Structure formats: C-alpha cells, structure tokens
Image: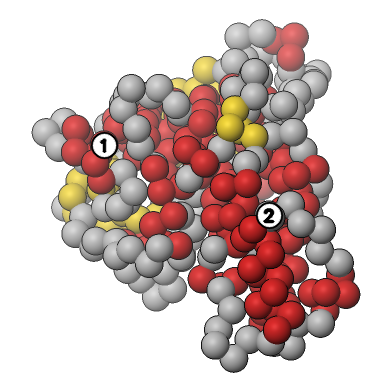
C-alpha cells in the first residue's frame, strides 16, 4: 500500500479496533517539540523544567499555577494552548472523537494551526488505502487554504503557502517541526505526473484543475464522501453539478464561510449580483441512500453543497460543516 502525507505524523499514532486514531506518547512529544515551545536561551527555570519533564513524560500533570509562573507572556500562552489541546486529546478515546467533540461544542477556540492538523491526520486515516492521487490532492483543501491560479480558461487551485500570497498560512507537520524547506515549484496534477504525487505529497506543490467537468470536483466529492463515512458512519452519495437550476433548495451546506453567506442569500430568495455569483466555484448534490437517517421534512430531497472563494481569491474549506450541517437524525461519533 502506498503511503502519503507522512509529515502529518500518522505513523506516531495507534489505532483501536474500529480503526480510530489513538494518541501515543510519541505523538504528544511531537507537539512539545514544536519550535514555539522550545525554551530560548533566556527562558526562565520554570519553563525549562516544564519543557524537559513533558518531553520525558508527556502525560505529566501540569498545574495552572505552574504555567502562570512562566516569566514570558508569549511562552505562557503557548503552553496554555498546547496543554488545552492535550487535555482534549486525552479526554476522548480517539482523535476522531476529540475532533467531533470540538466542532460540536459550538465554540472552536483552538488555534487554526492545531485544528487543521487534526483534520489533516484524521483525513489521512479516512483516506487510508486510497490510491487515487486526484482524490488525495482534493483532500488537501480540507486543511490547507488554496489560492486561485490564473491559467488561460482553466480554474486552478494552488496551495496558498507554496505559491505565496499576502499572508501565507503556516503548516503544522513534522516537516515544519524539523525546519525542512518546502519547494515553491508548482505543477498541475494530470495523468502524466499523477504517480509523482506519492513522493511529493508532503510538498503540496501540485495545483489542481478544478474546472467544471474535470476530475477536480469529482475528486473532492469522493474525499467528502469518505470524510462523512469515516466520522459519522453514514453513507452518502455526492456528485458535482455544473449548475443549480430550478432546484428546491430544501437544505444546503456552505463548505466555507463565503459559501455559507451565499447559501443564506439564496435561501431567503435574494438575487445574487454577478460579482457574488462569480465567487461560487463548485456545487454538489448530496443524497442519502437510507432516507430513514434524514430528519423531516427533508425526506428524499437532496442536500446541496456550495464551495466558494473569497474576494481575494482564496478558498478556505471548513470540513466541520459537513459534520454539523447535515440533516441527520442521529450523529454517531467515531470511537
């Protein structure tokens, strides 16, 4: 079986009988080895001792007073954040259950860096065994912001951090932990170079053709289907659409903040101006083979998924919307 996204650290985790990811000491130590937590030369004795002892025993109990005693304010904040993450991960039986608890709490107060890493590693588990580079590349949208790349008449998506931009988003991976460089050369994924994905998957340097009718939207549909199945235990069918005409918008899910705003306007019968409508990148129709799972009055009506870009041509997918926004009667958490 081919491996991919090695830098997310999935090999540091165990798996339970149901295939869920179980936290290990090695995984926790990788967080404590983050550059932000490495005590600088002028760090106080409290911070140095805490760091050293947590690397030796990542389950070590840390009192609130101990963190408060750290002299540097930034260091205190960093430790508060990572210890809150540790508490969440150790409270739940699996990473999947921890992520579901976080997104269902109604208040995701974890830094995006950590949330994206949880998505990265959970999606790696959900896609385990997938040997379609197009689906894997589409899955990168779940945890890495994308930028629209102009190329003739095609709609291309390139990794925001790799191709640059006004405010690139940092990646949380073992690669960044070790300070390894990430290349900036970007190719467009196609049949000819698809096999190269396996040795460059951690570089995120392949652009995805997301033009309607190409493999890009269909690949994202497959990744979303696997994500829902893995985390909710619900089978769905998702198909990309080229247009949404004369459809009853009984239920919709915005795959990002911009798409949610657009969906809200359509829901209330408000017309979309040309500029707003042009931000819609893709539409999908989701159906449930088992209509008994769906709340009334949805019944057998499809759910429409909307993907859009921001005014500055960025795509920031919120995969939690697929878990909290579907009209399902019983949401079963992964264990």
Residue 173 visible (yes or no): yes
| Dot placed on the residue nearer the N-terminal end, 1 or 2 | 2
Compared to residue 150, the image places residue 20 above or below, namely above
Residue 273 visible (yes or no): no
Q: Residue at x 11, y 33 (%)?
A: 192
The residue labelled by disc 2 is: 58
Compared to residue 230, the image places residue 292 above or below, namely above
Residue 91 is left or right of residue 123, and the answer is: right
Circle 1/circle 2 CB separation < 8 Å: no
Q: Residue at x 58, y 32 (%)?
A: 14
Q: Residue at x 75, y 9 (%)?
A: 292
- For disc 2, the neighbor class at 10 Å (few under 14, some 14 to 19, many from 20) is many
The one of 215 and 197 positioned closer to us in this rendering: 197
- For disc 1, the neighbor class at 10 Å (few under 14, some 14 to 19, many from 20) is some
Q: Residue at x 20, y 34 (%)?
A: 194
Residue 165 is left or right of residue 190, and the answer is: right
The one of 281 and 25 positioned closer to us in this rendering: 25
Q: Could you say where residue 164 lies in the image, as x and y percent from the top left? A: 32, 68
Residue 335 is left or right of residue 193, and the answer is: right
Q: Secondary structure at mark 1?
A: helix
Q: Quadrant of the N terminus?
A: top left
Q: Could you say where residue 180 lies in the image, as x and y percent from the top left? A: 33, 63
Tell me which corner region of the image, top left, top right, bottom left or bottom right, holds residue 197: top left
Mark 1 or 2: the one toward you? 2
Residue 30 is left or right of residue 295, and the answer is: left
Compared to residue 330, the image places residue 11 above or below, namely below
Q: Could you say where residue 105 lies in the image, as x and y percent from the top left? A: 81, 46
The one of 277 and 189 positioned closer to us in this rendering: 189
Q: Could you say where residue 287 lies in the image, as x and y percent from the top left? A: 58, 18
> What numbered label is drawn on residue 72?
none
The residue labelled by disc 1 is: 198
Q: Quadrant of the C terminus?
A: top right
């Amino acid at each position: 079986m081919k491996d991919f996204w090695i830098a997310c650290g999935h090999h540091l985790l165990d798996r339970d009988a149901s295939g869920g990811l179980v936290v290990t000491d090695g995984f926790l130590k990788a967080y404590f080895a983050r550059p932000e937590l490495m005590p600088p030369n002028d760090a106080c004795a409290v911070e140095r001792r805490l760091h050293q002892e947590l690397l030796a025993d990542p389950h070590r109990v840390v009192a609130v007073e101990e963190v408060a005693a750290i002299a540097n304010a930034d260091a205190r904040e960093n430790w508060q954040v990572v210890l809150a993450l540790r508490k969440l991960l150790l409270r739940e039986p699996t990473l999947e259950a921890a992520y579901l608890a976080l997104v269902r709490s109604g208040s995701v107060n974890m830094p995006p860096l950590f949330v994206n890493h949880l998505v990265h590693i959970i999606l790696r588990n959900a896609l385990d065994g997938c040997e379609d580079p197009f689906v894997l590349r589409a899955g990168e949208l779940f945890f890495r912001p994308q930028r629209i790349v102009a190329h003739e008449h095609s709609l291309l998506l390139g990794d925001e951090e790799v191709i640059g931009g006004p405010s690139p988003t940092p990646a949380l991976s073992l690669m960044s932990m070790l300070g390894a460089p990430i290349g900036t050369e970007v190719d467009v994924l196609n049949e000819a170079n698809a096999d190269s994905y396996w040795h460059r998957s951690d570089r995120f340097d392949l652009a995805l053709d997301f033009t309607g009718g190409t493999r890009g939207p269909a690949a994202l549909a497959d990744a979303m289907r696997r994500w829902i199945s893995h985390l909710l235990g619900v089978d769905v069918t998702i198909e990309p659409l080229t247009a949404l005409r004369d459809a009853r918008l009984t239920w919709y899910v915005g795959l990002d903040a911009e798409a949610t705003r657009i969906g809200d306007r359509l829901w209330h019968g408000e017309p979309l101006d040309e500029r707003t409508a042009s931000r819609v990148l893709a539409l999908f129709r989701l159906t449930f083979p088992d209509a008994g799972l769906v709340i009334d009055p949805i019944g057998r009506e499809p759910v429409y998924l909307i993907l859009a870009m921001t005014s500055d041509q960025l795509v920031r997918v919120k995969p939690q919307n697929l878990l909290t926004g579907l009209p399902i009667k019983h949401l079963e958490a992964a264990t």
